[in-house]
Image: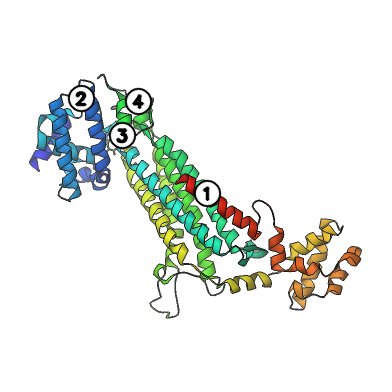
């Protein structure tokens, strides 16, 4: 411990005449949370050391020592034996101190031509790149699960809602495919974000670059970065890549939250459309009949956390002058939390969706009860020559008559319907009942993006193809 302490003090001790207090130490340290970056930190250091060697800045012996030491450290971390010390402030100083303890002077030469400022930005980008790939994996899984369920329900009729009032009949398959579209755009956004995350800050050093003859392209290549950050001040200072990720994560959560809200509604006895598998629900300690949709509710709640992370990072950034400021140490916890939350949520929903049990008869009944084919009747009258506004009014009267007599539109007699549209009465025939039927309405939405089962089937095939291409 005293060895490590003196190491950190060594890092800048000459300049200071008194130690920091315990509280300030805790306040300024980040190792409690940034130790999550350990493997990325080691990967970055190894690439940096290889480059220093290939540029003639580090000897072969030093490089070998660093590689040997880092391999040991990696084992210590993996086995949980590594001793993290808050006296060493952050993940970078902890690992560097351990390296020096293990291999001596070579460890002290590792930091040549770099700073913790470009180091931490590099670590964070490497870490986030992995999280983006995980997010993408689960976005594909969840889309697949939704598509599979949609396929089972291309013919299952449910009420489509606007204002949460029964509007027009749709199929449950079509409804589910709406979420697939949302998640597809989320995946596109993540893909785009990854390009900007995947750029190398290392080489920027503290802020101005370094006088050593470094080769940044080589480091980028070794670490799989597609590009190099092209301004040293920007490289160490901006966290827009993390903000962008959080914005995308917040949108994913927002989509899952909307779906969650529907699951909560649909699984309530008042709707009775679906049942969630027991493993995603809990009971009540007082009301024995309850089965609560905890997972969707929590996803809805956790959406606030991820949106909070986005707002935290935006606020963290907005007042900072160039270049690096210690404020940026505060970027990690919100980013980690957003990534953890979005990945967990997507993974859990990928399992929850296949376990949804659908009460197709209840869905259908709800569509029947809500006069959901009223627009179809209006469209029918328009086809007979009535202007749409007049047709709208005629159907409004028909709906009112149906409500007053406690009947569905399909239960109206042909003569009654004719009375509401006297101008085209002669032209109204029994085929009006095809239009008023739920299936008639659904099958008539026969175009790209419509709810007709053949269209939904086509949308499913297309979505599957896209997923196969993306994967
Ligand atoms: N722990 C720091 C962070 O997360 C590393 C960079 C520290 N740089 C500095 N100049 N104090 O941002």
Q: Residue at x 75, y 65 (%)?
A: 374
Q: Position of residue 335 (x, y in %)?
A: 36, 46
Q: Which residue is mark 1?
A: 465
Would you place residue 29 above or below residue 273 in this image?
above
- The span from disc 3 to disc 1 (Cα, nearest Å) is 32 Å
- The span from disc 2 to disc 1 (Cα, nearest Å) is 47 Å
Q: Which mark is residue 223?
A: 3
- Neighbour tally class for label 1: few under 14, some 14-19, many 20 plus, Cα within 10 Å: few
Horizontal side of residue 120 vs 398, given as left or right: left
Nearest to N terminus: mark 3 or mark 2: 2
Q: Which residue is mark 2?
A: 53
Element type where label 2 sits in the image: helix
Work out whether residue 85 can be spotted. Answer: no
Among the 4 quarters of the image, the one containing residue 160: bottom right
Labels 3, 4: front one: 3
Question: Ligand 1 is in which quadrant of the figure?
Answer: top left
Work out whether residue 324 can be spotted. Answer: yes
Q: Which mark is residue 232?
A: 4
- Neighbour tally class for label 4: few under 14, some 14-19, many 20 plus, Cα within 10 Å: many
Disc 2 + disc 1, Cβ < 8 Å: no
Nearest to N terminus: mark 3 or mark 1: 3
Nearest to N terminus: mark 1 or mark 4: 4
Would you place residue 194 above or below residue 271 in this image?
above
Q: Residue at x 64, y 52 (%)?
A: 449
């Amino acid at each position: 411990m005293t060895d490590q302490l003196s190491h950190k003090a060594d890092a800048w001790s000459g300049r200071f005449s008194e130690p920091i207090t315990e509280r300030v130490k805790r306040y300024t340290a980040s190792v409690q949370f940034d130790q999550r970056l350990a493997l990325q930190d080691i990967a970055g250091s190894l690439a940096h050391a290889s480059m220093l060697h290939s540029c003639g800045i580090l000897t072969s012996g030093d490089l070998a020592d660093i590689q040997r030491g880092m391999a040991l450290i990696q084992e210590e971390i993996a086995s949980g034996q590594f001793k993290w010390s808050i006296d060493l402030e952050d993940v970078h100083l902890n690992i560097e101190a351990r390296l020096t303890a293990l291999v001596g002077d070579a460890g002290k030469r590792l930091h040549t031509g770099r700073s913790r400022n470009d180091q931490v930005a590099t670590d964070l980008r490497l870490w986030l790149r992995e999280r983006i790939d995980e997010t993408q994996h689960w976005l594909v899984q969840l889309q697949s699960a939704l598509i599979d369920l949609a396929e089972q329900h291309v013919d299952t009729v449910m009420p489509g809602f606007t204002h949460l009032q029964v509007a027009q009949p749709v199929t449950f398959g079509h409804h589910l495919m709406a979420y697939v579209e949302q998640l597809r755009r989320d995946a596109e956004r993540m893909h785009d974000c990854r390009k900007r995350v995947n750029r190398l800050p290392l080489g920027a050093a503290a802020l101005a670059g370094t006088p050593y003859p470094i080769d940044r392209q080589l480091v980028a290549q070794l670490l799989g970065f597609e590009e190099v950050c092209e301004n040293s001040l920007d490289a160490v200072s901006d966290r827009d890549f993390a903000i962008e990720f959080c914005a995308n994560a917040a949108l994913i959560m927002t989509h899952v939250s909307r779906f969650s809200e529907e699951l909560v509604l649909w699984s309530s006895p008042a709707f009775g459309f679906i049942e969630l598998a027991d493993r995603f629900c809990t009971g009540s300690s007082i009301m024995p009949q309850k089965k609560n949709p905890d997972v969707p509710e929590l996803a809805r709640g956790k959406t606030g956390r991820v949106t909070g992370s986005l707002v935290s990072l935006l606020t963290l950034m907005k007042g900072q002058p160039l270049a690096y400021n210690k404020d940026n140490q505060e970027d990690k916890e919100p980013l980690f939390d957003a990534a953890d939350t979005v990945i967990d949520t997507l993974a859990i929903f990928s399992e929850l969706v296949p376990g949804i049990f659908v009460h197709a008869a209840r869905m259908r009944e709800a569509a029947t009860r809500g006069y959901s084919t009223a627009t179809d009747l209006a469209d029918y009258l328009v086809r007979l020559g009535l202007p749409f506004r007049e047709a709208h009014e005629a159907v409004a009267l028909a709906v009112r008559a149906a409500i007053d007599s406690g009947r569905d539109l399909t239960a109206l007699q042909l003569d009654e319907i004719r009375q509401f549209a006297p101008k085209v009465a002669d032209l109204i025939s029994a085929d009006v009942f095809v239009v008023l039927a739920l299936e008639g309405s659904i099958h008539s939405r026969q175009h790209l993006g419509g709810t007709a089962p053949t269209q939904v089937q086509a949308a499913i095939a297309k979505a599957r193809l896209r997923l196969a291409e993306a994967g």
